[in-house]
Image: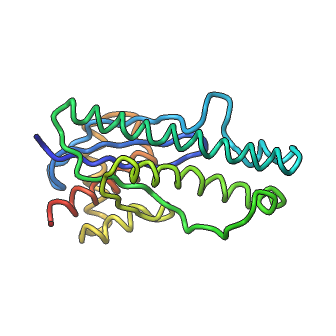
Amino acid sequence: MSRAALAFKARTGRAVLVALAGDGHDAVVIERSQFPLLPAGEMAPYHAAQPLPPQDAHRHVVRSIETAQRFATQAIRDAAARCVDAHHQICGCAVLVGAGMPEWTTAEIIAVHVRMHQAEGELFRRVLLEGVRACGFALTTLPAKSPIESAAKALDVTRGQLDAQLAALGKSAGAPWGAEQKEATAAALVVLGGFSRR
């Protein structure tokens, strides 16, 4: 049974998943996909809450967070189960994270448009973090603004070396292989690399 790592990049209302198996240098992509973090037709909880009365707005956001948490945790469990069914052992998960934000209330967030975007980004990243913890997997985090640079540093390789490995993995995996997949893959390599050095 080979080791496997899952990595997640949150987007608005969805998350990108890349799963790698093997060791750092001989890793292969065993899955790349995306999954919803909210039901169809729902994407931006704070934006949807803005026109509502204050109490209704807060209730809407709380319900959306609870729903997103259920979606995230179940999707992580399902991805891990697919890996196990394919005879891989999960050694950890990575999530690309933001810089955090103040503990604003719902009212404070929806009063300022830029805060709504910031809060929604944090919301979707946070439910992935909590989903990994709920599933009991070792958690690795990398900054969402510089994941490939941070991964290269963590792996003690140059950016050029990591770019070459990501390109090779993309060539073998095939399309789609955009920035989201590359960034999640870099994070998964950190999980595998960190595990192999333990």
In the rendered image, the vertical position of residue 163 relative to residue 17, given as above or below: below
Q: Is residue 12 visible?
A: yes
In the rendered image, the vertical position of residue 196 relative to residue 131, given as above or below: below
Image-quadrant location for residue 155: bottom left
Left or right side of 91 for 8: right
In the rendered image, the vertical position of residue 80 relative to residue 134, given as above or below: above
Which coloring applies here?
Answer: rainbow
Front position in the image: 145 or 89: 89
Left or right side of 18 for 104: right
Task: Pick the quarter of the image with the C terminus.
Answer: bottom left
Q: Is residue 179 visible?
A: no
In the rendered image, the vertical position of residue 85 relative to residue 26, given as above or below: above
Left or right side of 116 for 93: left
Front position in the image: 42 or 31: 42
How many numbered marks are there? 0
Task: Pick the quarter of the image with the N terminus.
Answer: top left
Q: Position of residue 31 (x, y in %)?
A: 31, 36
Q: Position of residue 167 (x, y in %)?
A: 30, 48
- Residue at position x 70%, y 44% from top? 45
- Residue at position x 68%, y 47% from top? 62
- Residue at position x 22%, y 56% from top? 192
Q: Position of residue 14 (x, y in %)?
A: 54, 40
Q: Position of residue 96 (x, y in %)?
A: 45, 57
Image-quadrant location for residue 151: bottom left
Front position in the image: 66 or 45: 66
- Residue at position x 24%, y 71% from top? 156
